[in-house]
Image (spheres, rainbow, N blue to C red):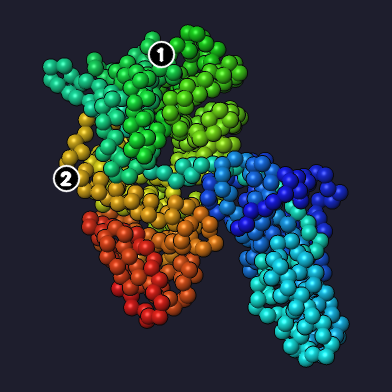
Amino acid sequence: MAPGTGSPDAHLPRPASSRATAVGRIAVVDVGPVHEAGRWPARAVVGEAVPVTATVFRDGHDLAGATAVLVGPDGVVAAREQMVPLGRGLDRWQCRLVPHAPGEWSFFVEGWSDPVGSWRRDALIKIPEGIDVDLTLDVGADLLAEAAQVPGVTRGQAALLEASAAIVRRSDGDPRDRLAAATAPEVLEILRRHPLRHLVTPSTPYPLRVARERALVGAWYEVFPRSIGARFSSAHGWESGTLRTAAVGLDRIAAMGFDVLYLTPIHPIGTTFRKGRNNALEASPGDPGSPYAIGSSQGGHDAIHPDLGTFDDFDALVARARDLGMEVALDLALQCSPDHPWVSKHPEWFSRRSDGTIAYAENPPKKYQDIYPLSFDNDPEGLYAEIVRICDLWARHGVTIFRVDNPHTKPLPFWERLIADMATRHPDVLFLAEAFTRPPMMHTLALVGFHQSYTYFAWRNTKTEVADYLAELAGDWGSYMRPTLWPTTHDILTPFMQWGGEPAFMLRAILAATGAPTWGIYSGYELIENVARPGSEEQIDNEKYEYKARDFTAPVAQKMSRLLGELNRIRRAHPALQRLRNLTVHPTSDDATVCFSRRLDDGDTASAAPDTVIVVVNLDARAVREGMVYLDMGALGLGPDGVFDAHDELSGHTYRWNSTPFVRLDPWTNPGHIIHVRPVRGTEADPT
């Protein structure tokens, strides 16, 4: 893709409102990816190929063509890509545009009349039939001569087109030879790269917001800092871990290949209505309380719990994480304990009930007396300024991602404004929405600015559920919502994970690590922490309400750590697993075996080389599953009779596969294949 040149305003379309008609001379409609007619931008990251589509057609019988144009944040055309038809007779066109830097980009589609293509189509009919031979060939010669003057055509290419035009124009030559000069492969290739375009009609420009790659690709590891290094003694009870002990524990996490360290809230915790173990309404002496009940006399969202340390300790943790190749994400939980300084200093930031008391959080019949929600309607500007100050504070201390707790309980305009303001102050800062809520809210949070989103992945378990959901995430949603896949969190332990044991934790890790470019685990995953609190979908002895000292030297933890490390190694080694919109689901004969592939080809300039990966997973945590996989060979970049070496990145084994390989997956020893496709030329199919 060659970069364009010219002044910022050169050849750029004007907004549709300035046009005399709603459609131009060449119709360009249904352009994508576009959201709410451009009200919100489509999304991409640096180096990600953005699939652009449009319906382009014209009146009459002449042919039309289409070009997609990418415009950089500076207003200069960065690239022009010829679009190709999606299918015969559909008038749908597609191509890919690849932005190379963060910022506010835009793109538009140019429709145009294709005089050379129209002439060639007619000439191939007329000349063999002897219809208007000289006139038809003279027209073709004129078009070839005009094509030689198209911008971008080199001197050598122009000379070839002019020589072809001269042959076509010779009245004494054989008409078939004259036509052949205009349809020679080398001539057609020049015209493909530099088409002669008449009646060029641009669409409206549409916004494209480009972020750094971490907005799409990452491996998260969640910790409660107070648990790392926590110690218990019968004489003194629990002693909290600190930010310094947490920094020491980072080596183990980094060794598994995780690149985002996610910290739950580290602020002072209230004592009024403090919850005890397992969400008990009354705390016992020594219970640390929920870190989501933020605020005490020791400070609020801009303070660090004294048990954890100081800002110097926090800076040291961030520095150590960076040294190990990790960045730090911090929970942004906009809620308060009754002891938060805001409660007394800014009572207007809270809602009051008819009896005058501040309303605590409720989700009937559940009550959260230890948490006061914020009201964004009483003093929106004052509250907004304070939250901006807090985000700015933590960003200046090295936080590059905010994992936002329950964003769906705050106004959408607030988030749109905050994320935009933070992008101006700290362009590298990202926001992840922890929004397990209704689809419209989840999707609109993404549209208004959230860079990433939690998903319903944890509750998708059957073959159909998994395949359909991964396809949805990689489809139209992928142009604005970047999913993160978590098998469990500190709040979520699904029934499947409760009864599935070690096989469930292995297979769900494989799915999460390959089903989307960003995935994450909650600390303790390595130890198969799968005992639920009765009547709930969360762990018993939940870490939200107590310290958790873990023994990661246990054999099961060592085994799981190796698997997690392998998954992150494989993700780094394969660019195909670092993209979202390149997924294809393949049928299988077994109703508990799911298969999908991801592919990057030569047309994706974000990839140094073509890369294709096939993932096959046994979704049954209790039984061996076997059957046939029916591969769409075209989606793998292979012919229907192609054969390839299937190198399993998990086991190290290599098989010879064709379009219908047989697989057998044991949930305890090999719950899945992650296959690197290595084409084999000139061999017969010999699937294993």
- When asked about the image quadrant of residue 247, the answer is top left
| Residue sitting at x 29%, y 35% | 250
Q: Residues within 10 Å of mark 2 (few under 14, many from 20)?
A: few
Circle 1 residues within 10 Å: few <14, some 14–19, many ≥20: many
- Check the picture and name the quadrant holding the N terminus: bottom right
**Which numbered marker is on residue 115?**
none
Residue hosting label 2: 555
Q: Position of residue 622 (x, y in %)?
A: 25, 55
Is 166 positioned to the left or the right of 656 in the image?
Answer: right
Judging depth in this view, the residue of 312 and 223 nearest the camera is 312
Q: Secondary structure at mark 2?
A: helix
Q: Position of residue 684 (x, y in %)?
A: 37, 81
Establish if 617 lies above or below 284: below
Q: In this picture, is 383 found above or below 52?
A: above
- Picture layout, residue 162 above or below residue 547: below
Q: Earlier in the sequence, mark 2 or mark 1?
A: 1
Snapshot quadrant of residue 81? bottom right
Tag count: 2
Residue hosting label 1: 299
Q: Amino acid at mark 1?
A: Gly
| 307 horizontally vs 551: left or right | right
Instruction: Kindly identify the residue that appears in the image at 31 percent across and 25 percent down.
Output: 243
Q: Disc 2 to disc 1, how far (Cα)?
A: 41 Å
Q: Of 522 and 118, which appears nearest the observer?
A: 118
